[in-house]
Image: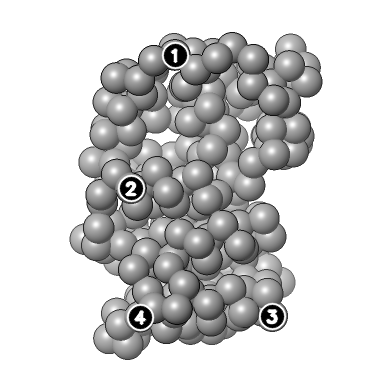
Amino acid sequence: MSAGRGGVIDVLVADDQAAVRAGLVLILGAAPDVRVVGEAADGARAVELAGELRPDVVLMDVRMPRLDGIEATRRISAFTDVLVLTTFDMDEYVFGALRAGAAGFLLKDVDADRLVEAVRTVAAGEGIIAPQVTRRLIGAFAARPAAPAEVPGLAELTPREREVFACLGEGLSNGQIAARLAMAETTTKTHVSRILGKLGFASRVQAAILAQETAVTGLSGLDPHMGSSGTV
């Protein structure tokens, strides 16, 4: 999802702790290209505000009253990019959030500059995952049996889309895919969008996971060496 009017990224902050929300608003508000358009103290309110405000990115906590962040993500990821930001890196939260369509998963120990950059990354249509989570994802895939070759929607991908799909599984950004496959970045974005549509996914992270599970790219994994987080 691209940035809002004038290149400004509209963000909705969802966290049940008022002090945390205030801190996030302060951090995001210091960036000239980011604007906080709303705050939610629970998942249900986050879903309501996301529908009303249509922000470019929702910064989502996991443990919240009324409706948890994973279910809230599932309800809004089809029309708004969600960046999960939580204290908890338990597998059930990581896999739950990504399967729900989250475009990214970061821990709250991320520093302010990298958090703002992560918001920009997600708003640009990329995915981002904390490095410690990335390594565990790779380990989890390596330990699992290979997924069936026949996956709904996979057979519908064109040869070029399969190449892009394989690159997603390697954790490459749109720019990196464009350079590798000698195509324009706008063309890459179009291919990614079509791949997600055919596979019925809300985020490229889901496609990257499927690419690894189906051994289209082998177990090369998401790149754990990209600063404090891996870009997908």
- Measured from the top left, where is residue 60 in percent x and y? 44, 67
Question: Which residue is identified by label 4?
Answer: 16
Instruction: Please report whichever mark, 1 or 3, sits nearer to the chain's N-terminal start.
Output: 3
Is 2 drawn above or below residue 25 in the view shown?
above
Q: Which mark is residue 1?
A: none
Please state which amino acid type lies under the numbered disc 2: Glu
Q: Which mark is residue 52?
A: 3
Instruction: Please report whichever mark, 2 or 3, sits nearer to the chain's N-terminal start.
Output: 3
Contact between labelled residues 1 and 4, with CB atoms less than 8 Å apart: no
Is 203 drawn above or below residue 134 in the view shown?
below
Residue, x 58% and y 68% (percent of image)? 9
The quadrant the N terminus occupies is bottom right
* Local crowd size for mark 1, using a 10 Å CA cut-off: few (<14), some (14–19), many (≥20): few
Camera-nearest label, 4 or 1: 1
Instruction: Please report whichever mark, 2 or 1, sits nearer to the chain's N-terminal start.
Output: 2
For the residue labelled by badge 1, is the local secondary structure a helix, a strand or a loop? loop
